[in-house]
Image (tube, rainbow, N blue to C red):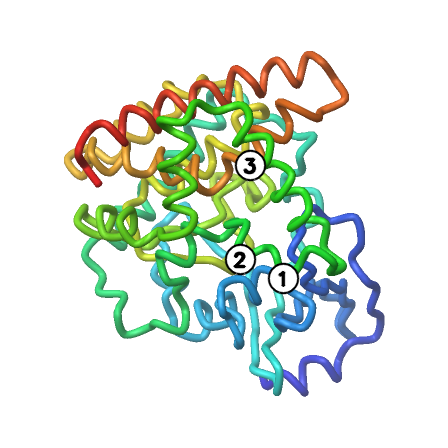
């Protein structure tokens, strides 16, 4: 159905506020004339900081849907997009309104449910292992851009903008510089300034379609199906990149240890498991979200959370050191 026709059937629309997204994308809940409930997302770099930071002028989430790549998701994994169309300064995607099926930061994944989700993520990665992704460059985030997304240099022009993210990340990197030994601190900051060596090392490993922002808050659970939301930063890379992002952002809300998450995913990959890719991806996780670990370790108001995040930061630093010393770069 053409976008103008679908939008013409909207009889009620309400801004969707209070969602966890930090990019600035505008969300609305739509009620159609037949009672169907949908969520519409307008994608434009004028309001979406992540689009600006990644050089996305169209909306990669729309491009992923329009390309047909999302129709290739394996059984047990789905997306929620039902329509999309380009606009002069971006695009629109319209999704099923999944309501309470979407996980929030207050929702924990117990061990069984976490393993269930990781097995489905691994199935997605296996499905796209041999799919050539080069024909859809507009749908994919360039890997160096993805890796250095939160680089202080990239964030500096946006410190006075509406989004708090650049200010938070910049403060986090300042804490990281104070808390992390130089043998890890300096290589991480070097990669933030010039991510190409890490990108090249990752490309030398078997690559697949990675979601790019795998987190519990970008998941919904419908019966035995994992619905993955927010396809705004898909990337061609080893699948472990998704797992590293999941670990860095969500370890506090899952009931598996970091090692159990990694081993569950590795077991689900089977013969496709690549240990070098795992180590490189964990370094990438530090480059991507080391600022967040350090920020919570230094500034969280709850001392128990500060202690937990400091222990978590130490784990990531140790993993980064292992990769830096391995000769994989």
Q: Which mark is residue 208?
A: none
Instruction: Decide: few, some or many residues near mark 2? Use Cα within 10 Å; few <14, some 14-19, many ≥20.
Output: some
Residue 38 higher or lower than 109, as above or below: below
- Residue 103 placement (x, y as % from top left): 63, 39
Please report the residue visible at 57 percent of the width from the left and 23 percent of the height from the top.
252
Q: Are marks 1 and 2 in contact (CB under 8 Å)?
A: yes
Task: Give the Cα separation between the discs numbered 3 and 2.
Answer: 14 Å
Instruction: Decide: few, some or many residues near mark 3? Use Cα within 10 Å; few <14, some 14-19, many ≥20.
Output: many
Q: Are marks 3 and 2 in contact (CB under 8 Å)?
A: no
Q: Which residue is mark 3?
A: 291
Residue 2 higher or lower than 207, as above or below: below
> Mark 3 falls on what kind of element?
helix
Tell me where residue 278 sits by quadrant.
top left
- Residue 303 placement (x, y as % from top left): 71, 13
Task: Give the Cα separation between the discs numbered 1 and 2.
Answer: 7 Å
> Mark 2 falls on what kind of element?
helix
N-terminal label among 3 and 2: 2
Tell me where residue 37 sits by quadrant.
bottom right
- Is 230 or 46 nearer to us in this picture? 46
Tally of numbered discs: 3
Task: Give the Cα separation between the discs numbered 1 and 3.
Answer: 18 Å
> Mark 1 falls on what kind of element?
helix
Relative side of 220 to 212, left or right = right
Instruction: Decide: few, some or many residues near mark 1? Use Cα within 10 Å; few <14, some 14-19, many ≥20.
Output: few
Q: Which residue is mark 1?
A: 157
Q: Which mark is residue 154?
A: 2
Please report the residue visible at 74 percent of the width from the left and 17 percent of the height from the top.
302
Please report the residue visible at 35 percent of the width from the left and 57 percent of the height from the top.
143
Residue 36 higher or lower than 135, as above or below: above
- Is 73 or 235 nearer to us in this picture? 235
N-terminal label among 1 and 3: 1
Relative side of 197 to 241, left or right = left
């Amino acid at each position: 159905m053409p976008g103008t026709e679908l939008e013409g059937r909207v009889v009620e629309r309400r801004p969707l506020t209070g969602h966890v997204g930090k990019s600035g994308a505008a969300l609305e809940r739509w009620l159609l004339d037949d009672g169907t409930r949908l969520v519409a997302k307008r994608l434009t770099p004028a309001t979406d900081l992540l689009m600006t930071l990644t050089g996305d002028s169209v909306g990669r989430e729309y491009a992923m849907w329009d390309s047909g790549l999302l129709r290739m998701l394996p059984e047990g994994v789905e997306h929620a997009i039902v329509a999309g169309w380009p606009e002069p300064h971006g695009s629109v995607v319209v999704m099923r309104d999944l309501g309470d099926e979407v996980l929030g930061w207050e929702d924990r994944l117990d061990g069984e449910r976490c393993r269930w989700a990781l097995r489905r993520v691994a199935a997605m990665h296996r499905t796209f292992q041999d799919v050539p992704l080069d024909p859809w460059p507009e749908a994919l985030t360039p890997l160096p851009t993805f890796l250095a997304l939160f680089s202080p240099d990239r964030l500096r022009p946006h410190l006075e903008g509406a989004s708090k993210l650049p200010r938070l990340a910049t403060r986090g990197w300042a804490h990281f510089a104070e808390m992390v030994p130089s043998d890890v601190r300096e290589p991480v900051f070097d990669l933030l300034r010039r991510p190409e060596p890490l990108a090249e090392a990752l490309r030398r490993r078997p690559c697949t379609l990675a979601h790019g922002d795998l987190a519990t808050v970008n998941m919904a659970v419908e019966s035995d199906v994992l619905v993955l939301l927010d396809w705004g930063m898909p990337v061609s890379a080893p699948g472990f990149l998704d797992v590293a992002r999941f670990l860095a952002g969500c370890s506090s809300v899952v009931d598996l240890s970091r090692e159990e998450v990694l081993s569950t995913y590795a077991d689900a990959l089977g013969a496709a498991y690549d240990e070098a890719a795992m180590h490189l991806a964990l370094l990438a996780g530090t480059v991507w979200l080391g600022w967040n670990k350090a920020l919570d370790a230094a500034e969280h108001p709850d001392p128990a959370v500060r202690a937990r995040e400091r222990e978590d930061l130490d784990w990531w630093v140790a993993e980064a050191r292992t990769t830096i010393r391995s000769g994989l770069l």
